[in-house]
Amino acid sequence: MRPSPGLILAVLLVLVTAQVVRLVVPGRGPYLWTFLLSAAGVVAGEVIAAGGHLNVPSLGVLHPLADVVAIAVLQAAGAVIAGRRSHA
């Protein structure tokens, strides 16, 4: 059983964006948190794109622009939440 190309692209997008966030913001917290936020961003981006709210180009079945925007929003929210917890 071969995995679908869309799933492989989604996994690669999650891994790459998680690594980029770790490089750009080194003191970001646990890697698992960054990874989960990236995965949630891909899911959210695909849901938004599938709902027809963003007419963005797709790469096969993946909508990378919508996914990257959703990942950026979730990573920023995660940074705000993590910052509040560390200062509390």
Image (cartoon, grey):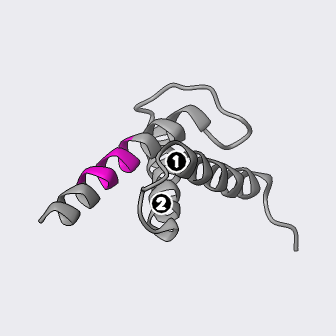
Q: Residue furthest bottom?
A: 1
- Disc on res. 34: 2
Earlier sequence position, callout 1 versus callout 2:
1
Rendered-image quadrant of the C terminus:
bottom left
In the rendered structure, the answer to whether residue 28 lies left or right of residue 66 reads left
From the top left corner, tell me how far across and down residue 48 is, in percent. 43, 42
Which span of residues is magenta-colored? 73-80
Vertical order, 38 against 71 (above or below): below
| Residue drawn 60% across the image and 37% down it | 63
Residue under numbered circle 1:
21
Q: How many marks?
A: 2
Vertical order, 78 against 69 (above or below): below
Magenta stretch: dominant SS? helix
Q: Secondary structure at mark 1?
A: helix
Q: Secondary structure at mark 2?
A: helix
Vertical order, 32 against 59 (above or below): below
| Residue drawn 55% across the image and 26% down it | 56
Query: Is residue 87 in the magenta section?
Result: no
Q: Residue furthest right?
A: 1
| Residue drawn 34% across the image and 45% down it | 76
Identity, as a three-letter code, of the amino acid under mark 1 = Val
Between 40 and 31, the one lying in front of the other is: 31
Q: Residues within 10 Å of mark 1 (few under 14, many from 20)?
A: some
In the rendered structure, the answer to whether residue 43 lies left or right of residue 1 reads left
Between 9 and 53, the one lying in front of the other is: 9
From the top left corner, tell me how far across and down residue 3 is, in percent. 80, 65
Q: Residues within 10 Å of mark 2 (few under 14, many from 20)?
A: many
| The quadrant where residue 51 appears | top left
